[in-house]
Image: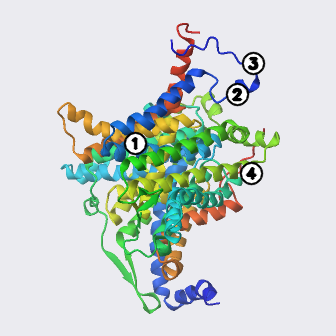
Amino acid sequence: MEFLNDVLVQPFADMAAAPDFLLQVLWEGLVGGVLYALIALGFVLIYKSSRIFNFAQGIMVVFAALTLVGLYEKGVPALLALPLTLAVMLVLAMTIERVVLRPLVNQPDIILFMATIGITLFLIGFGELIFGGENKVMITEQLFIPTGSIVFEPFGGFVSIEEKDLTAVIGAMVLVAALLVFLNKSKIGRAIRALGDDHQAALSVGISLSTIWVIVWFIAGVIALATGIVWGARAGVSFALEVIAFKALPVLMLGGLESVMGAIIGGLAIGILEKLFEIYWGQPLLGGNTEAWFAYMLALLVLLVRPQGLFGEKIIERV
Amino acid sequence: MFYRTAGQFKTSYEADHALFPIRQDAFLLGVVLVFAFIIFPLTASEFTFRALLIPVLIYSLAALGLNILTGYAGQLSLGTGAFMGVGAYACYKLITIFPEMNIVVAIALSGFFSAAIGVLFGLPSLRIKGFYLAIATLAAQFFLVWLFQKWAWLYNYNASGAIQVPNIDMFGITVSGPRATAITQYYFVLCVVCVITFFAINITRGRIGRMWKAVRDMDIAAELVGINLMRSKLMAFFVSSYVVGIAGALFVFLWRGAAEANLFDIPLSFRVLFIAIIGGLGSILGNFLGAILIVALPVIIGSVPQAFGIPLDSAMVEHLNIMIIGALIIAFLIIEPHGLARFWAMIREKFILWPFPH
């Protein structure tokens, strides 16, 4: 009975007793969720347009952030380093398309997936070789991101919101909105979606596979840079950031591999739920650090009910 | 050439399906075994045993386990490291609860624990496949490593949180623990690897192996011709996790000597996966070739530039190592998706046909 009480009653009593703390937890979860959603978005974009499960998205986040900070440390002004980093990401996209993807066109999905694991390793080694493996501080102030915090006092307690988190959330929303407009309204966006629907048909109406791939990987690179700036501002820039790539995978499973909406909603849901679980169930009952696996277990449970994820396309197989 | 097959006639199905339809293959294997059992132990130094020979064997065994699941049954797994951990922790608990138990028995039993966990995490494979399943195995990876850290009973409430291998004797010889010599450990690991490889070869080329391959190549078609998908997938998870668990137990008990939960984290899983990919998925020989390459690569990178008078520091060697492994994976996928094992197969083909190209 006591166990049931600890699991089913006590956490909710705690929430009700300290609503301000609950709000704080929810906010923290939301910010984490926005970041997961951003990484997942990079995955989805590439998967939609080319059926490649891009394992390297997480390391692209680290690589972009490292390039930005590394350039700044080499003496490039912050506002110049930003477009330079974008240029680096463009070169990276072109290189990946030329060296890795083009020779592997038409291979089974799993081969391409493993190739992106290869890209991941290469980028880790390459990045460490050039910028060193130690932790760096993100150039938050130089990019004019506010660093103070806003405190307000609901329910007689207080909730503190860091301004850089707020900027991150707003920035992410703008980015996603821009991306959706781009995908749905622009000519290139339509080409990307056409390629995702049917490679053969898209090719036969004159859509260039390699151009679109470069564009898509470049957009994924831009998203990676945005994620890298925001996450780097919170936790510093180092290859330890790699773990956040692993946090985006359950988001994808939950939301479905080919759904932009799924990535966003899945990301927010996992960010908030894992924080709640950690604070109210994980720490008192399980010894903490449940964030390491909670998202995976949640996604696994959802998958057992809906194997294509919440928003994924149902695959009907015929022999 | 020496691979001439003329005169080797087969007059029965048994002969056609023999383990070595060509006499030279058996001869070659004999030479390799002579090297492994006699020449290496006579010539190798303590360092060679610890840094090259034992890890190559253990990594080969782990990759063999993964290859049964991924290469033969087509279920991509990213959680190998955690299953190795289950084997290691199970073996540790068995040894500390029953100190009189023979270590061979303990290792053989510990495989069953990881097999059970493997089947448990293999259950989703009945509903989901491909990438979704690969991520589901990551759930096992993260959950189990977390469990190894938090469940103090597993490491006997040690203050360090790590498992320490005690001295274990077998027939009066110390085979495990700080007092054991490298050469006994090498022989022990070698014998285990040989036995398991023998069984693996025969499972994969027999009825069960063909069933797995059918599931891998097209599961719906396999189901239509009457293969029980559930049974063959779960069997693949069982056999694979058993072998991986044993590799994990050997990893800690006969090589590392001590282990923390972190040892079994993602990097280990990926290292085993790379061995399987570079060696060749769906090949037994490939695991050994892949393991040799992955274990030897950092040593080569460290020593070759030094020989040319360009000494690299250890961090640089590590970075280059990661970069080269990444590049190798991509290169192999582009040039030869079947890995190193396929190279050997091609060379062998050439030898058999020599001197005629067709």
Q: Is residue B185 visible?
A: yes
Dot 3 falls on a residue whose secondary structure is loop
Between A314 and A11, the one lying in front of the other is A11
Cα–Cα gap, marks 3 and 4: 36 Å
Cα–Cα gap, marks 3 and 2: 11 Å
Q: Which mark is residue B17?
A: 2
- Which of the chains bears the disc numbered 4? B
Q: Is residue A235 above or below residue B81?
A: below
Q: Which residue is mark 4?
A: B231
- Which of the chains bears the disc numbered 2? B
What colour scheme governs how the chains and residues are painted in the rendered image of this protein? rainbow
Q: Quadrant of residue B139?
A: bottom right
Q: Which residue is mark 3?
A: B11
Q: Which residue is mark 1?
A: B53
Residue, far front: B172
Front: mark 1 or 3: 3
For badge 2, the amino acid type reads His
Q: Quadrant of residue B140?
A: bottom right
**Between disc 3 and disc 4, whose residue precedes?**
3
For badge 4, the amino acid type reads Arg
Cα–Cα gap, marks 1 and 3: 41 Å
Mark 2, Cα crowd under 10 Å, few <14 / some 14-19 / many 20+, is few
For badge 1, the amino acid type reads Leu
For badge 3, the amino acid type reads Thr
Q: Are marks 1 and 4 on the same chain?
A: yes
- Which of the chains bears the disc numbered 1? B
**Between disc 4 and disc 2, whose residue precedes?**
2
Dot 1 falls on a residue whose secondary structure is helix
